Amino acid sequence: MSSKSIPRLVLDGMGIFCACTLAWEHLFTVQLSEGPSMYPTFSPRGDHLLISRVHQRGRDVQVGDVVRFYHPTFLGVHGAKRVLGMPGDFVCRDLPFSTGVGGEGEMIQVPEGHVYLGGDNLPWSRDSRNYGPIPMGLINGKIIARVWPPSKMQWVQNTMQPAQED
Amino acid sequence: MRVSPNPTQSSPTQPPKRTPLLSSLRTYYASLPLPFRRTMRTLRILAPLVPIGLFFSEHVSQIMWVRGPSMTPYLNEDYHATHSTSDMVLVNMWPFGGGGWPWQRTRRLERGMVVTFRSPANPSHIAVKRIIGLPGDRITTRAPCVKPSQIVPFNHVWLEGDAADPRHTLDSNSYGPVSISLITGRVAAVVWPKTRWLRWEDWEGEEEKAGYRRGTRERVLKEAVQLEAPRLH
């Protein structure tokens, strides 16, 4: 305590707190998932996920990435879904909670600056089939790995495949 | 004849002297010139101010410049005269309204507030518009909108620019109701060129009496439907 005064300690503490918050908001976040919408990619009981905040606002996001976003209809709630369509893509907007894909529904073009999202567990997912394409400004990160439990620690794979021509 | 002193032989009882990395660095630092060391000490004291400043500008308050004619004459008053005017505004970035705290997860938004939000069409662009309608309001839309009227859904607001000519503003009439999650801050004051506080109460107070943007207020039917929070799961 001789060399450092109390105000300097307070200043350093605030600086460290703000730097950690900025890193948490702009580099990496770890969060517990919940809900069945991304089964079997994530457990319905919840997994701890590593989220890259560098990809927020849809920067460098591709079709097939799992992104976390501010829910458009609930303030302060995050969702995690897979990107199915980028701006300009044509996607089939199925009926909400439909079990299959490409059945009844309409073809829409994803508007500029929006993405079309879908859960992996189609009948249990509320996604763009309900609320339509969402603005990229709502995306706040890309989920890159599952870090806990350690037995299931792995990178999140981009499971989308190019369409097969018959 | 020269004798080179050997430390192990001269003091056999003491362990050989180590030079740890930290203390050698300290010795090296002490050998640097004094003005350099003085500058480094000042920088070390000021270093925490950088993250504190960034945190402040992201979460508390921020200065922004408004470009374009969409809020004329409320902001950029003489835009049509010069076309290069750009008001400097103070934006309140604290996302929780009133005396709110982070855990309350509410946001105080009122008709007449001027807010900044990420443009739905271009995520890297931050736009400034006025809140015209809150969730549950029925809006009679204007020019570029394809629907004649629109009910603002839950957790969305209807935003419009103040420009009288709808061609000068790109707002909810083009891209529909905007999610409250996209809103980043509220414009609190104009810093330059005409310093003044902006009070959202004036929208239904003094400005209504003065007849400012009367047509816009008349296109809003307040609380036309009672919205319930949709179920999360």
Image (cartoon, coloured by chain):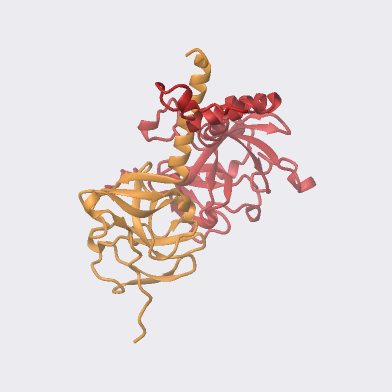
Residue at x-position 57% and y-position 30%: B47
In this rendering, the count of numbered labels is 0
Residue B128 screen position, x and y as percent: 58, 44
Q: Is residue B201 visible?
A: no
- Relative placement, left or right, of B86 versus B43 is right
Q: Nearer the viewer, residue A78 or A72?
A: A78
Which quadrant holds residue B107?
top left
Residue at x-position 64% and y-position 33%: B210
Residue B35 in the image: above or below residue A7: below
Chain whose colour in the figure is red: B
Outermost front residue: B1
Shown colour of chain A: orange
- Relative placement, left or right, of B51 versus A50 is right
Which quadrant holds residue B74?
top right
- Relative placement, left or right, of A3 versus B193 is left
Q: Quadrant of the N terminus of chain B?
A: top right
Q: Nearer the viewer, residue A32 or A11?
A: A11
Outermost bottom residue: A166
Residue A86 in the image: above or below residue A166: above
Residue A64 screen position, x and y as percent: 38, 65
Residue at x-position 74% and y-position 45%: B79
Residue A135 screen position, x and y as percent: 46, 55
Residue A28 in the image: above or below residue B113: below
